[in-house]
Amino acid sequence: DTEVTQTPKHLVMGMTNKKSLKCEQHMGHRAMYWYKQKAKKPPELMFVYSYEKLSINESVPSRFSPECPNSSLLNLHLHALQPEDSALYLCASSPWTSGSAGETQYFGPGTRLLVL
Amino acid sequence: RKEVEQDPGPFNVPEGATVAFNCTYSNSASQSFFWYRQDCRKEPKLLMSVYSSGNEDGRFTAQLNRASQYISLLIRDSKLSDSATYLCVVSLLGGFKTIFGAGTRLFVKA
């Protein structure tokens, strides 16, 4: 099973709402990632977890709060978002077997978020 | 200067054509290199990793020149199904930090 799943597929929320995006993989991967992708732009790295610990936070505003409850799950909690946060949010995972670079990242289909 | 720069595109080519994409990266500490493909409204998918010795997968050939900090992708005998955005990807910091180029859009026409 080389699949990363994300829910929901689409999400519309108001600026005062609290919502969460979920990502799951059952490939035994130990690194998981959140990316943000705006239309006609490449994905931009937001957060990286390795072995359930936050390894990289690319200076993401605190209205985005990641959580890694276990090695298979990655959440992104959203609160008080702005319309400019509307984007495709992609989750990815990679094996991290050797602790070195060069591993393929497997992407989920993404959640399309619209903030009104 | 962007950390990863690609040909702006789009590239419009007929079926059967050979097309080459170029990519440069600015951080000499970059450790791994990839080409991903992204179809419209879909997630990126790995096309191939790029090694210093060059590597080939069917109609696709990737090259890396570390001295020039340059990566290339050659597609031979283009198919309609090759139409997509091709993303040059560089990773550093032990593989955690992944930087995508802006992508080059390819349209293959019958």
Image (cartoon, coloured by chain):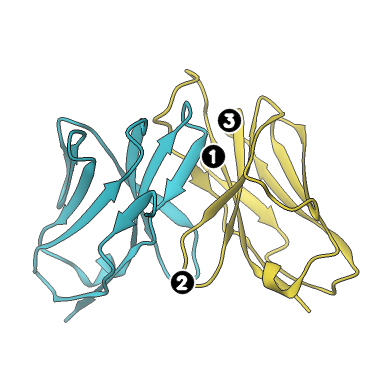
Chain colours: A yellow, B cyan
Please, what is the three-letter code of the amino acid marked with disc 2? Lys
> In the orientation shown, which residue stands out farthest toward the top?
A98
Depicted B79 relative to depicted B1: above or below: below
Q: Cβ–Cβ below 8 Å for labels 1 and 2? A: no
Chain bearing tag 1 is A
Disc 3: host chain: A
Q: Residue drawn 72% across and 39% down?
A: A73
Instruction: Describe the element under mark 1 as helix, strand or loop.
Output: loop
Q: Position of residue A6 (x, y in %)?
A: 66, 54
User: Disc 2 marks which residue?
Assistant: A40
- Depicted A50 relative to depicted B50: above or below: above
- Disc 3: CA contacts within 10 A as few (<14), some (14-19) or many (>=20): some
> How many residues crowd around disc 1 within 10 Å: few (fewer than 14), some, or many (20 or more)?
few
**Mark drawn on residue A29:** 3
The residue carrying mark 1 is: A1
Query: Height in image: A74 above or below A108?
Result: above
Quarter placement of the C terminus of chain A? bottom right
Identified at 35% across, 62% down, the residue is: B103
Q: Secondary structure at mark 3?
A: loop
